Image (cartoon, helix red, strand yellow):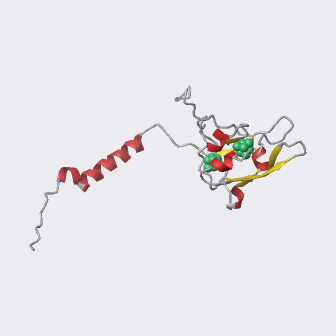
Amino acid sequence: MAINVKVLDRPIPQTSYVRATISGMALTLKHLLDRDKVTIQYPEQKLGVSPRWRGTHRMLTTEDGKAKCVACGLCPTVCPSNCIKLVPGEDENGNRYPLLFEIDEFRCIFCGYCQEVCPEEAIHVGRHYENSEYSREGFVYDLERLMSQTHPVCEMWDPADPKGE
Ligand code: SF4
Ligand code: SF4
């Protein structure tokens, strides 16, 4: 069986490397001469983050300094990354509380489901991003560490106010 070879004409105006190179260099030159600087001197200078920023978690506390969590188990159930560890306990009055509550910030994808589902508004994603560590273990936040966070918490998206106004 004969094999037919079809030779196509290369559309030079659209595929010219010279043209693309000149256009790229022109763009670079334009930005070189651009007087509006977009870089900042981090960490001395910082940009504010959106009220909807979802970063480092924070566990809110009651007036007497206890975690607001009632160990209902909803957040570890809903978490798509399986990064929340909860061991529930119960006091002599039948009140539930977390014996162990940990979030692995390294595995977390900051979806915010835990905040959305929490019936006590206890666990929140926070408007915070400076949480680098030297080891993976360092990213595992226990209850005490979650309670000691002081950064503002995320204002989740409200369908009644889609633009956040
Ligand atoms: S933000 Fe999402 S991924 Fe992170 S702990 Fe909460 S539910 Fe899990
Ligand atoms: S959803 Fe809220 S109350 Fe329930 S286990 Fe999670 S943090 Fe605690």
Q: Quadrant of ligand 2?
A: top right
Q: Residue 117 vs residue 11: left or right? A: right
- Residue at far right of view: 92
Rendered position, 6 above or below 153:
below
Give how far across and how far down residue 49 sits, in percent: 60, 38
- Depth check, front residue: 96 or 3: 96
Question: Could you tell me which quadrant the C terminus lies in?
Answer: top right
- Residue at far bottom of view: 1
Which quadrant of the structure image shows residue 119?
A: top right
Give how far across and how far down residue 144 sits, in percent: 80, 49
Question: Could you tell me which quadrant the N terminus lies in?
Answer: bottom left
- Depth check, front residue: 7 or 143: 143
Residue at image x 82%, y 50%? 89
Q: Residue 122 vs residue 81: left or right? A: right
Residue at image x 21%, y 50%? 14
Give how far across and how far down residue 130 sits, in percent: 66, 48
- Residue at far front of view: 94
Rendered position, 18 above or below 40:
below
- Depth check, front residue: 154 or 113: 113
Residue at image x 49%, y 39%? 37
Q: Residue 43 vs residue 147: left or right? A: left
**Residue 98 appears in the rendering:** yes
Rendered position, 111 above or below 18:
above
- Depth check, front residue: 98 or 58: 98
Which quadrant of the structure image shows residue 113?
A: top right
Give how far across and how far down residue 132 sits, in percent: 66, 54
**Residue 58 appears in the rendering:** no
